[in-house]
Image (cartoon, rainbow, N blue to C red):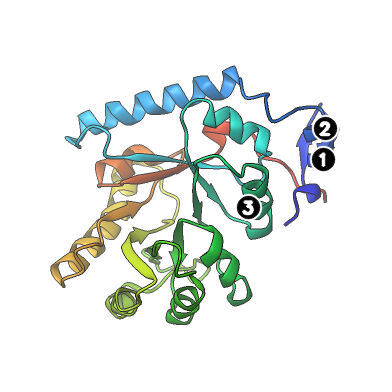
Amino acid sequence: MSLGACSVEHGPDSYLTIEQYMSSTTPTDTDNPAIAARIASLNGRMSAYEKKYARVPGSVQLLAVSKTQPFTLIMGAMACGQINFAENYLQEALEKMDALAGHDLIWHFIGPIQSNKTRALAERFDWIHTLDREKIARRLNEQRPPSMPPLNILLQVNTSGESSKSGVEPAALSALAACVASLPRLRLKGLMSIPAPAESLADQRASFGQLREARDRLQSEGFSTCTELSMGMSNDFEAAIAEGATMIRIGTDIFGPRMKHPA
């Protein structure tokens, strides 16, 4: 998706294109009180939940999901010390990386992976959260430049059993983990999931607990580097932290409403 294909709300019934929005700002417009307040609130809640659930202080990372948001808002988050950014759309992400070249940022890919996009993913990203096929693993390994460190990999697990959800089935997880662990240009780091929506904290915890248990099983099988759990978004990250999340993925609660695609 091209940045120019998006629009941002400018009034009750009108939207600005990304190009129009960016033309009204500059890369030095980094002060954004709303983003600063949201990030401060999120960090406070994360710290409170770490304490509530006996987690090590600072053990949960905040990933800013910046899909469909312009680079000027990303810079607002950067001004607050945010360095981990997550993107769903490859072309949009590459444009942002180019616009923000020179900044020490860590880029996470959290969208579906197409075979014809693996080279750019291997060459440009630090983390991949959505690997669920051996074919994709082998392509990423072959295309990761030798001059770069191994690509950090999280395996996406379909814990809900929904046919509409991506992810490796739990029964096939060990085989995929073994494949990734055998590839020298990849580094198996953990698991990721997008569970079915749940209303209660108890139901949310049960879903996230399945991913934690899957991670623990892999560790017991000898996959010692499989330590990370990428789970939890704006409406359920308390439950995710309670169940051991090491990364939570937050978008709207940092940046506000997302850009809208024209109908």
Callout 2–callout 3 Cβ contact below 8 Å: no
Q: Quadrant of residue 76?
A: top right
122 relative to 215 in the view: left or right: right
Callout 1–callout 2 Cβ contact below 8 Å: yes
Can you identify the residue that label 1 sits on?
Answer: 19
Q: Mark 3 belongs to which amino acid?
A: Ala
Can you identify the residue that label 3 sits on?
Answer: 93
Other-residue count near label 1 (Cα within 10 Å), few / some / many at <14 / 14–19 / ≥20: some
Instruction: Tell me the residue at 68%/24% (across/down).
Output: 29
Mark 2 or 3, nearer chain start: 2
Residue 99 x, y percent position in the rendering: 68, 43
Please, what secondary structure does the residue beneath circle 2 have?
A: helix
101 relative to 202 in the view: left or right: right
Please, what secondary structure does the residue beneath circle 1 have?
A: helix
Can you identify the residue that label 2 sits on?
Answer: 23
Residue 116 x, y percent position in the rendering: 63, 75
Q: Is residue 34 visible?
A: yes
As drawn, the residue found furthest toward the front would be 147
Please, what secondary structure does the residue beneath circle 3 have?
A: helix
33 relative to 259 in the view: left or right: left
Q: Quadrant of residue 46?
A: top left
Q: Is residue 111 visible?
A: no
Q: Mark 1 belongs to which amino acid?
A: Glu
Vertical order, 92 against 260 (above or below): below
> Foreground: 18 or 168?
18
Callout 3–callout 1 Cβ contact below 8 Å: no
Q: Mark 2 belongs to which amino acid?
A: Ser
118 relative to 237 in the view: left or right: right
Instruction: Tell me the residue at 63%/57% (across/down).
Output: 89
- Determine the CA span between mark 2 and mark 3: 19 Å
Vertical order, 217 against 24 (above or below): below
